Image: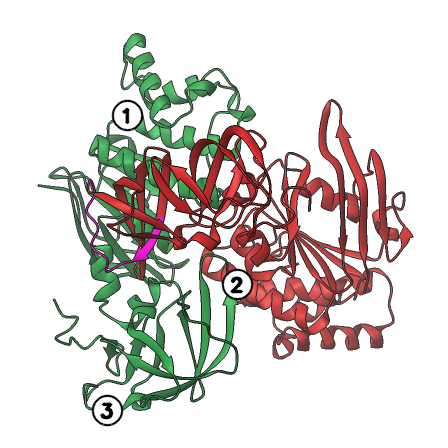
Chain colours: A green, B red
Amino acid sequence: MAEISLVEVSKRFGAVEAVLGLSLSIADGEFVVLLGPTGAGKTTTLRLIAGLERPDKGSVIIRGRDVTREVPAERDVAFVFQQYSLYPHLTVYDNLAFPLRSPARRMDESFIRRRVQQVAELLHIEQKLGNRATALSGGEMQRVAIGRALVREPAVYLMDEPLSSLDAKLRAELRLELKRIQRELGTTIIYVTHDQIEAMTMADRIGVMSKGILIQLDTPRGIYERPKSAYVATRLGNPSINLIPAKLLANGSVPAQAQTIGLRTEHIRIFAADRSGTRARVHWVEHLGDQNHVHLKLDTHSLVTLADPAQKLTAGDEVTLEFAEPLYFDQAGNRIPTDGVHA
Amino acid sequence: MAEIRVETVTKTFGTFTAVKGVNFTVDNGSFFVILGPSGCGKTTTLRMIAGLELPTSGRILLDGEDVTALPASARDIAFVFQLFALYPHMNVRQNIGFPLRCQNYPRSEIDKAVLEAARLLQIDQLLDRRVGGLSGGDRQRVALGRAIVRRPKAFLMDEPLGALDSEFRKLMCSELRELHDRIHATSVYITHDQLEAMAMADRIAVMNGGLIEQIGSPQEIYDRPKSMFVADFIGAPPMSFLGVRTALQRGDRVIRIDGASVDMPELFEDRAEGRFMLGVRPENVSFADSSGLRGRVIGAEYLGTTQIVTVITASGQIKARLPAASPVQVGETVGLKLRPDTLSLFDSSSGQALSSARHAGGHNG
């Protein structure tokens, strides 16, 4: 059964359509990531589910119950915000215990102690339980904020960029931990981010949003390999997909209605110039440590692809390119299914 | 234009020493990044260069002149905090010209300097617009314009892109670097984001616990980390380490791990038996059935073009960056091949790299 459903939900702020006719169904135990740039409507969607905003149209259903008219406290959800909102005068323990001590819940202190201990261990902050919340590092504070949501067992956890204020290393660690915790506990999470790595590594399904519209909802692999449009294709992949005019590669394999060709690293093979094929020139090789990007000039267009460490390329080299099963997009930007990639 | 020299600078706050005898030189016209986790002393170091903190000991030289005791206003330096602080009631021209108006420059000179700064940032067509209606990128460019309009000797930037989303941050990184290439102003940039550091810096100083762990070009720091701290701080995912207890001899090219022989760069020093860590970056790990070094796959993170596969061996956890198309089963046992010439060996207790064909000079250089 679906844990959360949104049915044709719309929300407008003044002249801005923040969310437009959004329908979405999320299963029990599923980790869904809403991905999109600032202003795409992802945070509004989360707030609509939480009850922090009321939709203009449509309904929100949690565990089969229409909660559209209910206030946040009546809905069975826990929200983790981007800024860790801890009580500075309380210890880590009391911050974690706080949601369980709410008069609406009235839980036994020995149960609370067990639950807090359990969550603290899960998040590796059990050493810090006696500390004041203000005596923690940023990463620890965010763990406590996540922990405060985890002590409860709501129908769904709503998380709004919970890792974005952390440094890269900590972000990578917490990403893995969050996914592990979600798997172990079988929790349902709706997670909002603009970070494609977070989306790809944690999500069971990614919802790509733009201008209030949910454009595509699919597994990470589905979104990456079979994007609905050129816009979706640019959301995932590093380096980003290269979009070049189809006429540059006009040959038998390009579908007639194709306007744009989408080339990712895995679609591009680089050979020595003495082969027949599409000619290009190496513009420069950018060393980014783990990833070295080759910038190619094809006619007046730039292509960026990952360097193969075994292939020695230098700026100025003439090369021949071959393309294996690239993506094709029509005039409206929609992907044209081809046998190779249409599964 | 200026060279900045920081000589054995220490800063103590009460009983806490934030910066412990730090030494470095920022070459005239170069882009220098200080990289480290929060609390490593990087911001304190920057504030001392700016004149916002007084060192407890040591000297700071700007173009050879000792400025240690000079107040911030007497050092011709621009400090850029969060870039978004614009005056909303002023237009772009007034925002950029503001620092010059404060110093009572003549009108004609201000106009000229503002136009020049705007041209450098390619926002000269926006000069009469209100900042309220501008896109995020243009606002950021205006803020930058306000910093460069004074043409100071040096720019100091404290995590200026910290508040931006990752996509926009990447764009601003390349714009900042392009701007630097046009005006060649000596720049010191503070960040905890290794990608920003890798993308922009001529040289990076990695700081940890008030000390500089390593200074070098981005590639040098990535390829030849002098310590496990640096190896672990740089790279996403960072370097993986396999622990081994052994004695080592100058000239060794093979190390025994879990009964398997692993080729490595020629070692340049003798070591008595002790615990060492073999470091390998994810892109230098591949699967090979024939390899004696074996482990169990415990996870695979799909990244589109590539995937990061985590493998547990008897000596530690290794991450491998493999093509996304490689079939990987969680739970299966695999053989691991490590690219020999890329490996680093560290002393487990000191965390320092051993001297080898990969790390000539070792922990001293």
**Residue at x-position 61% and y-position 79%:** B125
Please state the chain letter of the residue tagged with numbered disc 3 in the rendered image: A
The residue that label 3 is drawn on is A251
Please state the chain letter of the residue tagged with numbered disc 1 in the rendered image: A
Looking at the picture, tell me which residue is in the foreground, B161 or B103: B161
Please state the chain letter of the residue tagged with numbered disc 2 in the rendered image: B
The residue that label 1 is drawn on is A152
Looking at the picture, tell me which residue is in the foreground, B268 or B139: B268
Compared across the picture, whether B244 is left or right of B313 comes to: right
Looking at the picture, tell me which residue is in the foreground, B123 or B230: B230
* Occupied quadrant, residue B179: bottom right
Please name which of the two marks, 1 or 3, marks the residue nearer to the observer.
Answer: 3
Q: Magenta segment, which residues?
A: B320-331
Magenta stretch encompasses residue B328: yes
* Occupied quadrant, residue A106: top left
Q: Is the magenta stretch mostly helix, strand or loop?
A: loop
Which mark identifies residue B136? 2
**Residue at x-position 84% and y-position 75%:** B109
**Residue at x-position 37% and y-position 28%:** A123
Labels 1 and 3: the sequence-earlier one: 1
Compared across the picture, whether B187 is left or right of A167 comes to: right
Disc 1 residue type (three-letter): Arg
Locate the C terminus of chain A by quadrant. bottom left
Task: Identify the secondary structure beneath mark 2.
Answer: helix
Q: Is residue A122 above or below residue A206?
A: above
- In the image as oriented, which residue stretches furthest toward the left? A1
